[in-house]
Image (cartoon, rainbow, N blue to C red):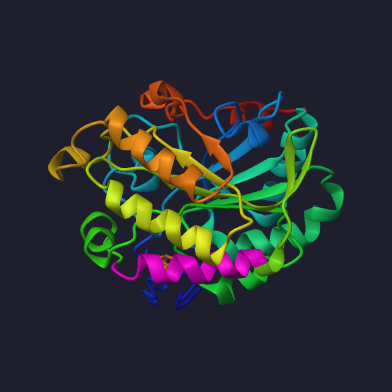
Amino acid sequence: MTTCYECPRNCGADRTSGLGFCGCGKEIEICRASKHFWEEPCVSGENGSGTVFFCGCNLGCVFCQNHQISRKLTGKTSPVHCFSQTDFCELLLFLQQTGVENINLVTPTHFTEEIAKALKTVRPKLSIPVIWNSSGYEKPETLKKLDGLVDVFLPDLKFFSKKNAAAFSSAPDYFSVAVKAIAEMHRQQPKTVLENGRIKQGVLIRHLVLPGMTVESIKILHCIAEKFPQTPVSVMCQYYPAGRAKEFPPLDRKLKYLEYSLVKKQAKKLGLTGYFQETDSATSVYTPDFSDNGLLDLFFSPR
Ligand code: SF4
């Protein structure tokens, strides 16, 4: 961690004394852990997904719906908790005890090394799947640290063009990097396994359709059909202008019904299977309340 090259930003930051682009030091930082019911049905199941929301982010999209915790920019948030390896393992076991369907690690990339170390210890005690829920802006060599430790990969595939990736995430290489990362995820979990409608293993690619960018979405779907044809896809329409989106037209508006319909139709034409959201999902109602730490108070209370 004295020179961090964990992700494609390659900051080389000394995270023992400062912060890199991701905004985090060496300790695992978490601001919320909760039962989450608004993921895909195969992830939320009946009992909810055991989400762990990490602070910071190595991608930093201007429209981030979790901007209060990913950029630590605005809004009232619950306090950030730094977790030791031992406490992090205990948190995962605690979540399992609450009856959740899985452990869902949200935006974990910049803590990969620490999480992998913890999972090596705790994985044998977890009887539910571990989900890696990431932006896709990851290095294959970093993801290799998770080999045998993660059951389900839930990567985004966000931008196709270098121009948009540069403008909205300061990451012109996003697409080529994310495709290589997803290929590594496939190497680790090549087969999608569903039991009673719950995902147990595999890769599920998420794509959020952005306003004014249907051409971009269709190019992404073509790439998925060509490179990862058997992979289920979640095509999402829950976009609303969050974070700094108002400063970046056309991201300053919601998605139009016709835009989503066009992308959905193309996905079906390409034979992609998976999930399509209802068009009334574009609201902050489905974004967790980050002023509330969820189950963390209960976790820290004497038992
Ligand atoms: S994980 Fe953070 S500090 Fe390390 S290279 Fe990526 S952005 Fe930089």
Question: Magenta region's main secondary structure?
Answer: helix
Residue 187 inside the magenta-drawn segment: no
Q: Quadrant of residue 259?
A: top left
Q: Is residue 135 placed above or below 212 in the rendered structure? A: below
Counting the numbered discs, the total is 0
Left/right of residue 253 with respect to residue 284 in the rendered view: left
Q: Is residue 15 placed above or below 302 in the rendered structure? A: below
Left/right of residue 124 with respect to residue 202 in the rendered view: right
| Residue at x 50%, y 47% (from the top left corner) | 206
Left/right of residue 215 with respect to residue 18 in the rendered view: left
Q: Is residue 23 placed above or below 274 in the rendered structure? A: below
Question: Residue 254 versus residue 245: which sits nearer the camera?
Answer: 254
Left/right of residue 208 with respect to residue 38 in the rendered view: left
* Residue furthest to the front: 269
Which x, y percent locates residue 143?
Answer: 60, 68
Question: Residue 89 versus residue 128: which sits nearer the camera?
Answer: 128
| Residue at x 74%, y 36% (from the top left corner) | 198
Q: Which residues are drawn in magenta?
A: 172-186
Which x, y percent locates residue 97?
Answer: 80, 32
Which x, y percent locates residue 38?
Answer: 54, 28
Question: Residue 272 versus residue 183: which sits nearer the camera?
Answer: 272
Quarter of the displayed picture in which ligand 1 can be seen: bottom left
Which x, y percent locates residue 258?
Answer: 29, 31
Query: Which quadrant would the C terminus be assigned to in this image?
Result: top right
| Residue at x 40%, y 60% (from the top left corner) | 58
Q: Quick check: can you spot residue 213?
A: yes
Q: Is residue 68 placed above or below 294 in the rendered structure? A: below
Q: Quadrant of residue 199?
A: top right
Q: Quick check: can you spot residue 15?
A: no
| Residue at x 35%, y 39% (from the top left corner) | 262
